[in-house]
Image: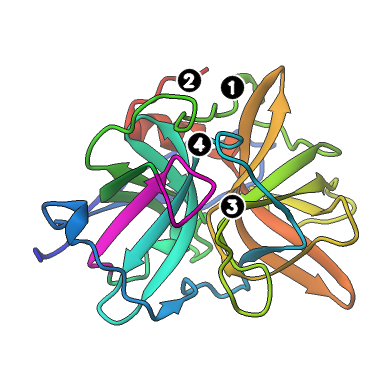
Amino acid sequence: MKTFIIISILLTAALADDQPSFPAFTTHQREIVNPDSVDDFVFNGNVTKPPSSRPVIKISNGRQARDGQFPFVAEISINLQSGGLLCTGSLIAKNWILSARHCIADTNAKSVLASLGSADRQNPTVRIYSNMFIWLNAGDGHHPDIALFRLAQNAPNNNRVKPIALPSRGRQNSLFEGNVGTAIGFGGTGGGQLPRYLQYTQFRVLNRNQCYLGENILCSQPQSGTSSLQGGDSGGPFVDTVDGTLTLIGVNVFVATSGSNVWQGSTRVAGFLSFIHDSTGIPYR
């Protein structure tokens, strides 16, 4: 395994006087060399959750997805020096997946495999290695929990594997307050077991008077009182139909609790359109 290559590029942004002051972000890039064939990938069975300081998302009491219902969802298997971890991500272009920063940035990943094309995690139709990862660091240590995974080859485009739309540039400041979105993931459903099938459930985005978890965090609560969020899955999509198009509005990254109240925290994708465009070349909508 070759040594990771890390390249840092300083990003600067001019902020208007009446806008909140944010620290400058630094883009970090890591590359790894994977085995020649996906047939050589053997996942270390000791699955651990990603190293996040907050509990990450697991969809319990959700619904089972059917094949082709969410063709953009990828299960991400990450082999570490010891053990392994699982995350979920969203295909946003033929060779790019968007997921959570803490799935990759603070790990010693040996190999990373993305599985697509099936709601049954035991029978993916496509498996592709990911060999480059890009994320942002903030000078104050409050790093945006968002990361790009480049696939080593292009994913197919069919009724089971298809990228999801990003928010349009006109929506870059949208908070989607009051919208009911869908959280999707391959994380555990309860009892410490991983489900065989992709799960999903709905959440309503709260306004900032009801819940504020950060400038670029969408805060939401389960639409149904029977759905709950616990530790287990990270990086999964939070989607909603925006201006007539199914759109990736959030990357599910953590839960926050206070007494009996539970909130989902999702990185607001619209706030990072420039980062995605500059890093991948994916055109703006």
Q: Amino acid at mark 4?
A: Phe
Within-10-Å neighbours for mark 3: few <14, some 14–19, many 20+: many
- Judged from the image, the secondary structure of the residue bearing numbered disc 3 is loop
Q: Is 6 on the left or on the right of 252, as rendered?
A: left
Is residue 32 at least partly visible in the picture? no
Which region of the structure is painted magenta?
109-124
Q: Which residue is mark 4?
A: 72
Q: Can you tell which mark lies on residue 198? A: 3
Between the C-alphas of marks 1 and 4, the distance is: 18 Å
Q: Amino acid at mark 1?
A: Ser
Assign the N terminus to one quadrant of the image: bottom left
Which residue is rendered at x = 29% and y = 82% of the image?
82
* Viewer-nearest of discs 3 and 1: 3
Q: Residue 179 placed where, x, y %?
A: 82, 36
Q: Can you tell which mark lies on residue 284? A: 2
- Judged from the image, the secondary structure of the residue bearing numbered disc 1 is loop
Which residue is rendered at x = 15% and y = 52% of the image?
37
* Viewer-nearest of discs 4 and 2: 4
Between the C-alphas of marks 4 and 3, the distance is: 12 Å
Q: Which residue is mark 1?
A: 168
**Residue furthest to the front:** 123
Choose top left, top right, bottom left or bottom right for residue 279.
top left
Choose top left, top right, bottom left or bottom right for residue 67.
top right
- Judged from the image, the secondary structure of the residue bearing numbered disc 4 is loop
